[in-house]
């Protein structure tokens, strides 16, 4: 051998050539001699991480199965009373985009730059923080950034939810998923009462005085665009029917709603005047709507 033979190598002759075969030691090294290291990352440590991740995944799936997702009504762009709100894990971003320096002409900062810095820093953290120290109080930069991010996310999430609750109170709005659930309970209760009440079912409210001249005024008013020509409204979208409205409001109250609005409904007086209706027409309309009562 011109270059000598190394320990752990075996010379195997294949024909006229000589090929060295390296014999590898398959015994895992003793990691006690390596400070700061306890085991091989692959597969030992990685396998433990996967097992922990599976346990958390099963826990999340159990929560998803036990509590169904709240469902609202089908999307309706004409429903101006709807207050949009994202899922809880995006509330902090939703609140961030409300501030003037992250919206409007600065929307790129709120949608690209800030999230890019946050998630980009998270991806680069293993490559930037390569020190052997793992105690958080001896890693001031990494620990400070993590704590600052956690506080900011918690504050923005709380602020967003608090503002949403204030909007609901100010507009007297019930969230769609709650309203839909209540309607389903009412329908079930009504169905049980109808089936066990001797077969007597309440008659549906019809349009009262459909040939009244005020009915033609109604067709020209702004009311028809939301409540429909048949006065049935769109209950699934939070727009009540006007059939039977006379049982809830008298003429003066209806006129007050037209002038000042109610709940998510905006004032309609100026819009109706702009469409060519007069105060006398609106007075007749309010009187006709007050006559809309359920059949006894």
Image: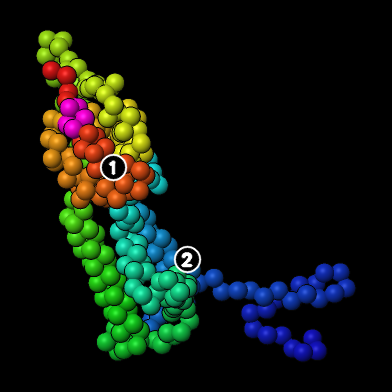
Identify the element where label 2 is drawn.
Answer: helix
Residue nearest the observer in this picture, 85 or 16: 85
For this orientation, the residue located farthest to the right is 16
Could you tell me if residue 165 is visible in this image? no
Residue nearest the observer in this picture, 238 or 20: 238
Q: Position of residue 127 (x, y in %)?
A: 48, 81
Residue at label 2?
Answer: 43
Could you tell me if residue 214 is visible in this image? yes
Work out how far the residue at label 2 is from the one at label 1, CA to CA, in angstroms: 82 Å
> Mark 1, residues whose alpha carbon is within 10 Å: few (<14), some, or many (≥20)?
few
Q: Which mark is residue 278?
A: 1
Identify the element where label 1 is drawn.
Answer: loop
| Segment colored magenta | 287-292
**Residue displayed at 56% across by 74% down:** 25
Residue 232 found in image quarter = top left
**Residue displayed at 23% across by 39% down:** 280
Magenta span: chief secondary structure: helix
Q: Position of residue 34 (x, y in %)?
A: 42, 84
Residue nearest the observer in this picture, 234 or 75: 234
Q: Is-magenta flag for residue 222?
A: no
Number of callouts: 2
């Amino acid at each position: 051998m011109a270059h000598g033979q190394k320990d752990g190598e075996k010379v195997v002759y294949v024909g006229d050539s000589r090929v060295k075969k390296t014999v590898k030691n398959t015994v895992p090294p003793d990691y006690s001699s390596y400070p700061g290291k306890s085991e091989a990352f692959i597969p030992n440590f990685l396998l433990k991480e996967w097992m922990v991740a599976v346990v958390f995944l099963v826990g999340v799936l159990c929560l998803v199965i036990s509590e169904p997702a709240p469902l609202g009504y089908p999307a309706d762009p004409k429903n101006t009373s709807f207050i949009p709100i994202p899922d809880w894990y995006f509330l902090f971003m939703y609140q961030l985009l409300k501030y003037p320096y992250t919206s409007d002409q600065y929307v790129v900062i709120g949608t690209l730059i800030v999230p890019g810095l946050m998630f980009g820093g998270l991806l680069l953290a293993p490559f930037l923080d390569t020190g052997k120290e793992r105690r958080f109080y001896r890693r001031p930069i990494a620990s400070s950034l993590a704590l600052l991010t956690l506080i900011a996310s918690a504050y923005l999430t709380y602020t967003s939810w608090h503002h949403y609750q204030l909007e609901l109170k100010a507009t007297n709005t019930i969230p769609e998923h709650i309203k839909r659930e209540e309607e389903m309970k009412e329908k079930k209760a009504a169905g049980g009462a109808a089936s066990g009440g001797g077969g007597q079912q309440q008659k549906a409210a019809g349009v009262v005085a459909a040939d009244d001249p005020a009915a033609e005024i109604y067709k020209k008013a702004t009311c028809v665009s939301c409540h429909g020509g048949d006065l049935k409204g769109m209950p699934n979208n939070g727009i009540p029917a006007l059939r039977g409205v006379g049982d809830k409001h008298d003429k003066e109250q209806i006129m007050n709603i037209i002038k000042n609005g109610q709940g998510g409904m905006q004032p309609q007086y100026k819009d109706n005047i702009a469409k060519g209706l007069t105060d006398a027409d609106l007075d007749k309309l309010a009187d006709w709507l007050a006559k809309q009562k359920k059949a006894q």
